[in-house]
Amino acid sequence: MPPSRPSAAKSILRALLRRCPNCGSPGIFAGYTTLKERCPQCGLRLHRGESDYFIGAYLLNLVAVELLFALVLAVVFIATYPNTPWALLQWGGLVLMIAGAVLCYPFSKALWLAADIIFRPVSEEELAWHRRDGTLDEREELPHL
Ligand SMILES: [Zn+2]
């Protein structure tokens, strides 16, 4: 039986709840930002077998925090014009950017995985590969590439 493919909205919602975007299982994080190697329910390798998999999550996190800062900057600027508190924006923005990067990072990892699953759905062949132990031999290619 082929694995049921979650809808894009369901994958994203699961990621926002820090659950496996593929099956919805909780417990994919070993710590606040550290993902386990595999989903405890479906067995999906959360890096999908790629060593540089979460570079996209770093980028997603950076963009999210930059947009958050831009939103706060615009709201404070419009609400307080012409007496804009530039020093508060400068130092508050710094604190917001650092805190936002830390707070958003685990969500960006899960969202990156969800986006990847939306564009490259997990096939039965790939899931069987994820559930196997061991690594790739030199002749084998990742089944989802
Ligand atoms: Zn799963």
Image (spheres, grey):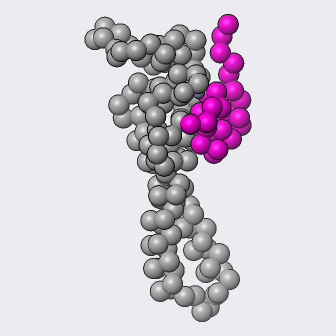
User: Magenta segment, which residues?
Assistant: 1-27
Task: Pick out the residue farthest to the bottom.
Answer: 83
Q: Residue at x 40, y 15 (%)?
A: 133
Q: Is residue 12 visible?
A: no
Q: Residue at x 64, y 27 (%)?
A: 23
Q: Is residue 8 above or below residue 4?
A: below
Quadrant of the image where one finds ligand 1? top right
The C terminus appears in which quarter of the rendering? Answer: top left
Residue 73 placed where, x, y %?
Answer: 57, 74
Question: Of residues 37 and 98, which is closer to you in this image?
Answer: 37
Residue 102 placed where, x, y %?
Answer: 47, 58
Question: Of residues 127 and 120, which is closer to you in this image?
Answer: 127
Q: Is residue 136 above or below residue 88?
A: above
The N terminus appears in which quarter of the rendering? Answer: top right
Q: Is residue 93 left or right of residue 84?
A: left
Q: Is residue 110 magenta?
A: no
Q: Is residue 81 above or below residue 46?
A: below
Question: Of residues 93 and 21, which is closer to you in this image?
Answer: 21
Classified by dominant secondary structure, the portion drawn in magenta counts as loop
Q: Is residue 14 left or right of residue 43?
A: right
The total number of labels drawn is: 0
- Which of the 4 image quadrants contains residue 42? top right
Q: Is residue 32 above or below residue 39?
A: below
Q: Is residue 8 magenta?
A: yes
Q: Residue at x 68, y 41 (%)?
A: 13
Residue 15 placed where, x, y %?
Answer: 61, 40
Question: Of residues 143 and 99, which is closer to you in this image?
Answer: 99
Q: Residue at x 53, y 16 (%)?
A: 127
Q: Is residue 16 visible?
A: yes
Q: Is residue 13 left or right of residue 31?
A: right
Residue 136 placed where, x, y %?
Answer: 34, 14
